[in-house]
Amino acid sequence: MKNMKIKILALGATVIMFASCLKEGAMNTDPSAATNVIELANTGDNTAPAGIAGYYADLGVLGAGDSSKFNINVHYTGPGTANSDITVTLASNPASLTTYNTANGTSKEVPPTSVASFPTSVVIKKGTSQTTVQATVKISPDFDYSKAYALPIKITAVSSGLISGNYGVSVYAFGVRNKYDGVYKLKGYHTRFPYNFPYSNITMEMRTLGANAVGFYWPDAGSFGHPIGVGPGSVSWYGGAIAPVVVFDIATNLVTNVFNQGGATPISIYTGPGSGQGRQAADKTMYIYFRYNANDLRGFLDTLTYVRPR
């Protein structure tokens, strides 16, 4: 078999065989160059720079109790199709996620079982080469929007054939956004002289940081933070040390808190001249008023017009 190495380990009366194949073509293994190898096939683009294959599913906006699904593809790589039903056993393998994180410099976590589940037994039917099942993600009380979740799924047994050594395990990451998340156009001004020049038409991302919290993320700066007017039509920023997070009441869409995730400088709701009720309106426009160092001469008065999902 081209580009394939087979290891056979004898454990008492049991023989375990693993096949290692190199990635070729659209599938992880070229079917014309493999015989009866079972693997986890591509589910979108492989996002992992190194090691174990990784995929990402954007599940969109989900609230408490909502659920969504993403695909898991299980593939038979022999020439043609499977000549009999093949039962494939899947299991969560946290050790693989540790390996993945180390190789890619990430810090993904296995989600609680109340948050994510997947079928543990899959059948590739005779006459086919692939079956697709779905993992389910639910926003249970255990769901933490601030964590980067990923399911490390491994093929642990097959009723016929060999388990792929390279693609017998994959990491399936997924992301969920709250209803305030999105891309907005920011306009406003700062109350501190001489930095009180208006700013406008600034693309700002409001990124999910909790079930009802979003943080200002400025794509032009590539970081969480907030711009400041420094001249007519000119903006700069304080840096990541001033990175406001806005907390909403989900029932009323009113702002209940603004705090700083970027450093020790305190940020709070601004109620001084020009301010109003912080909120998200029915058209998704946000009106945000905050200050730092408990000083009304350090206030920001922002209007964010919704553009599109992030």
Image (tube, rainbow, N blue to C red):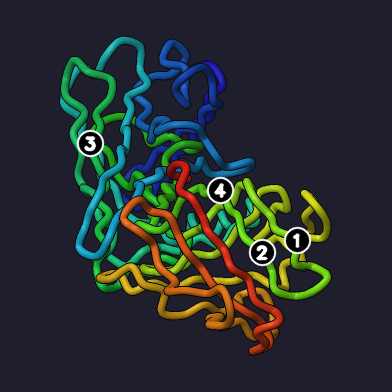
Return the residue at label 3.
159
Contact check, label 1 and label 2, Cβ < 8 Å = yes
Q: Residue at x 38, y 19 (%)?
A: 35
Q: Secondary structure at mark 3?
A: loop
Q: CA distance from mark 1 to mark 3?
A: 70 Å
Return the residue at label 1.
197
Mark closer to the chain start, 1 or 4? 4
Q: Three-letter amino acid code at disc 1?
A: Phe
Mark closer to the chain start, 3 or 2? 3
Residue 189, which numbered label? 2
Q: CA distance from mark 1 to mark 4?
A: 17 Å
User: Quick check: 44 above or below 201?
Assistant: above
User: Quick check: 224 above or below 183?
Assistant: below
Q: Secondary structure at mark 4?
A: strand
Q: Extreme front residue here?
A: 273
Mark closer to the chain start, 4 or 3? 3
On the image, the x and y values in percent for residue 134 come to 24, 41
Q: Three-letter amino acid code at disc 2?
A: Tyr
Q: Give the camera-side residue of 227 and 128.
A: 227
Q: CA distance from mark 2 to mark 4?
A: 14 Å
Locate residue 244: give its quadrant: bottom right
Depth check, mark 4 against mark 3: the one in front is 4
Q: CA distance from mark 1 to mark 2?
A: 6 Å
User: Quick check: 229 above or below 293?
Assistant: above
Q: Secondary structure at mark 1?
A: loop
On the image, the x and y values in percent for residue 37 come to 38, 27
Q: Extreme bottom residue here?
A: 294
